[in-house]
Amino acid sequence: MTALAWLSVAVFLGAYALIATERIHRVASALGGAGIMLVIHASDAEAAFFSSETGVDWNVIFLLLGMMVIVGVLKQTGVFEYLAIWAAKRARGRPFRLMVLLVVITALASALLDNVTTVLLIAPVTFLVCERLALPVVPFLIAEALASNIGGAATLVGDPPNIIIASRGGLTFNDFLAHMAPMIVILMVVFVGLCRIMFRKAFVYDPERAAGIMQLNEREAIADRTLLWQSLVVLALVMAAFVLHPVLHYEPSVVAILGAGILVAATKVTTGQALAEVEWPTLVFFMGLFVMVGALVETGVIGQISQAAVGATEGRLGLTAIGLLWASAGISAIVDNIPYVATMSPIVADLVQANGGHDHAQVLWWALAFGADLGGNATAVGAAANVVIIGIAARNRTPISFWEFTRYGLIVAFVTVALVTPYLWLRYLM
């Protein structure tokens, strides 16, 4: 690597260390790292702000902004209080049952929507129900972030890297359902078991609070029925457009911004009220992170790492697939999986063709998808859903530290990727 490449690696590792140790606020660390990357010319304005491969992913930023506005309007209707009481009553106040209900809902919703939208919708419910039952909210939030990344891997629209893979590999929505979804169902069953073990200290049952919850009428929580119906109609249209992305060809970011604009314009909610719920620090953190990772792509660092990982397999399909799975999981735990997949997908396309392009060679696409999607669970900054959950927790004065999230995420990422390994081998390589 060039001297500039090594210098960019040093800047990234320094910023990452500050984020991990929380010596400096994560937003300041990300912005500082991004600024230094521009100063040393590891990136420039063109690459940082306008490139689709090495710049800020404005689709992600505006998708988040639009959904945050929609969620902010929904919050004023009382619907989250309604859902919190409903979920607690369904679980009969039992903490573990409640967590299972919430993570399953999160995983299913993430398969149909993007996982970031899902955690934006489920987090307010979680705060309310945990407050009602006097439960620690952090374990529930972490479990939901992890579940969203697992569930999002099941479909083409569930996680942004899947869209990139589908485009490059010529794969369809049904391909993802057939090849990814069956294993994701198994992983979710295992994940529920892991939750029972990892978060067991949080499952303290309070009979009095549970009895109090059972006496509540969730319908009384709705504060504005007209605004609720207006919001639900817009949200339903936005969700439908997300699902129909392969047909409509509208980017999720465009759909989210249009939905937010229509909702604010058509209701009595003011612009100030709508924007008050936006997690601005989270959006800025993503911008800084995108610029830093883009600089690593620009200087060739990520490309060299990817090629070295593939080269180490010596052209053998089975070894290449398993190596690609674990390398993708490892790298996606450290850097955002979107630029990684964008960088790696041309290499995988060449490898598929080098192996004749037959059905067995398609295992390389599934290895890349599983590794990138599941590896994002390993650390607090490995996936967009993780960062959003941490931002929401901080806003509600229940901060989640980098290592508090990561100590659970590493376990889940390792176990799920380990289970995918024999799945790929037995289904495609035997």
Image (tube, rainbow, N blue to C red):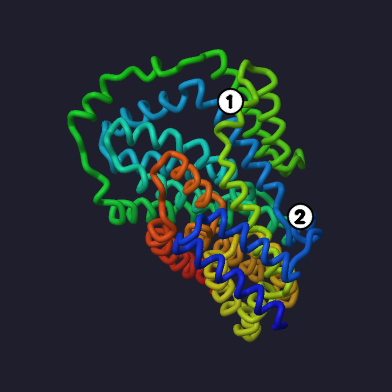
Q: Amino acid at mark 1?
A: Gln
The N terminus lies in quadrant: bottom right
Is 334 above or below relative to 197? below
Q: Is residue 428 visible?
A: no
Name the image quarter holding residue 87: top left
Residue at 81% across, 59% down: 46
Task: Identify the residue shown where x is 72% and y is 82%.
Answer: 2
Residue that carries the numbered disc 1 in the rendered image: 273
Pick the front one: 129 or 369: 129
Q: Identify which residue is drawn at 45% across, 34% down.
A: 124
The residue where tag 2 is placed is 49
Q: Quadrant of residue 105?
A: top left
Q: Quadrant of residue 293?
A: bottom right
Residue under the point 72% across and 31% down: 258
Q: Nearer the viewer, residue 304 or 147?
A: 304
- Which residue type carries mark 2? Phe
Q: Is 251 on the left-hand or right-hand side of 182?
A: right
Residue density around tag 2, few if under 14, some if 14–19, many if 20 or more, within 10 Å: some
Q: CA distance from mark 1 to mark 2?
A: 29 Å
Task: Report the disc number at residue 40.
Answer: none
Q: Earlier in the sequence, mark 1 or mark 2?
A: 2
The quadrant the C terminus occupies is bottom right
Q: Position of residue 269 (x, y in %)?
A: 61, 20
**Camera sees residue 152:** yes
Q: Nearer the viewer, residue 78 or 182?
A: 78
Asked whether 418 or 26 is in front, the reply is: 26
Q: For this view, does 54 lie left or right of residue 18?
A: right
284 over 256 or under it: above or below: below
